[in-house]
Amino acid sequence: MVSRRNFLASAATMVGAGVVTRVGAASLPEAVIMETAATQAPLAPPNGRPYHPVVTLNGWSLPWRMNNSVKEFHLVAEPVVREFAPGMKANLWGYNGQSPGPTIEVVEGDQVRIFVTNKLPEEHSIHWHGQRLPNGMDGVTGLTQPGIPPGKTFVYEFTAKRPGTFMYHPHADEMVQMAMGLMGFWVTHPKNPDFMRVDRDFVFLLGNYDIQPGSYTPKVSTMLDFNLWTINTRVFPGVDSMNVRQGDRVRIRMGNLTMTNHPFHLHGHEFAVTGTDGGWIRPEARFPEVTMDIGVGQMRALEFIADEPGDWPFHCHKSHHTMNAMGHNIPTMIGVDQKGIAEKINRLVPDYMAMGERGGAMGSMEMPLPDNTLPMATGEGPFGNIEMGGMFTTVKVRKEQKPGDYSDPGWYKHPKGSVAYEWTGNVPAATRAPGASLSAAGVEYRARKPQGHQH
């Protein structure tokens, strides 16, 4: 744990006793800063109502102080540097040292006070996405409040009225500030900690960025054509795995703050969508799924029993969302003989590699890239290149994983005889329909030309 002080290693102690005495109850709560992108241990509540904390993938939860039964948090909007994956960092805007900002966890009925300090070069405000609250606390610059000027601190106060999954993000110069990474997750736990209890509860936000190869700052005017699709502002292989014990009931909560929808797909298990923007879904209304589409601005929670051991992918099913920094204007070269072209170009550019003739697989090829640029898809697994990036991670299910242990168990050791293998016997010729013939070389299909209308 790295922070202004080593706080999450003893988070409960610090939150319960350290913060208020250090800064005084009449002053601002301390704005705790996180400096690492590693997934932090759940923050057990040291005071207030009990709840089962969540784990923020590649993130953390924000400590609070109690002030006359009010939970007080302090967010600081400021420029930050976020590592998307080893080998690439970006100049972003975030909260308390990170993008996304820390997860805020409260309990249904809690009185909440959030201090927001603006260290950005322009006005700011925070919208508490999905909350029922007084209109003046909704955080919309110009409509429900004036913008928070640079250097100033505003206070938001409301009651967390209903349990569920929520987000927070700016509503001042929204397109620019969200394109720069300002966002965060919010969980309101139920009063009854045993309501819909699970063994593991993961949360993360989906984001999108346009950072050109060799650069460090996102293009904030991009509308749709982003080139980095992120899980908590990380891309695979920089996204941590979700490590669970075989037999655990697992919940994954997601919020979508990108500009498109994301059909998230889990391998090896069926799940039920148990929560939406409006709250929890009654058990009799749920149905099994293996893919869940999450629209722009929506929050979803899914649950499943992790009963199959292994390393199971969990990813957006839009294939270009599981690539990093790819160019979208690359011509299709499948079937095109590039040998002659490559020889000519190599006279001018010795490192040039002809690609795409047999598909887009990178294998173990390494191409020279601009500084601070990630390869498109080079996550390494136990069998070689996974050929995934962006919105991709894994759920690691292990019998030996102890309750409460979120550490990475390493790659799965497959039992003997349980891995796909090569067929070495004879391969019979394909059966064809009577009279069928192969197309002539170079002919891809036959087309019937229009014959005109007969009526």
Image (tube, rainbow, N blue to C red):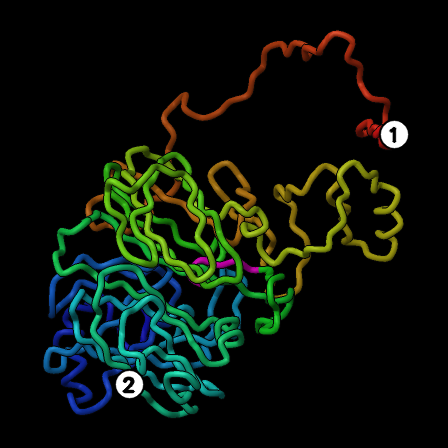
Circle 1 packing at 10 Å, graded few (<14), some (14-19), many (20+), is: few
Query: Where is residue 7, by image quadrant?
Result: bottom left
Residue that lies at the very extreme toward the front in this rendered image:
455
Residue that lies at the very extreme toward the top in this rendered image:
434
Q: Is residue 210 above or below residue 239?
A: below
Closer to the observer: label 2 or label 1? 1
Rendered location of residue 184, percent (x, y): 37, 68
Direction from residue 233 to residue 216 in the image, left or right: right
Rendered location of residue 64, percent (x, y): 21, 75
Q: Which residues are magenta?
A: 228-232
The residue pinned by badge 2 equals 155
For numbered disc 2, what is the local secondary structure? Answer: strand
Rendered location of residue 65, percent (x, y): 17, 78
| 261 or 102: nearer the viewer | 261
Q: Main secondary structure of the magenta part?
A: strand
Instruction: Tell me, for residue 451, which label it has, or none.
Output: 1
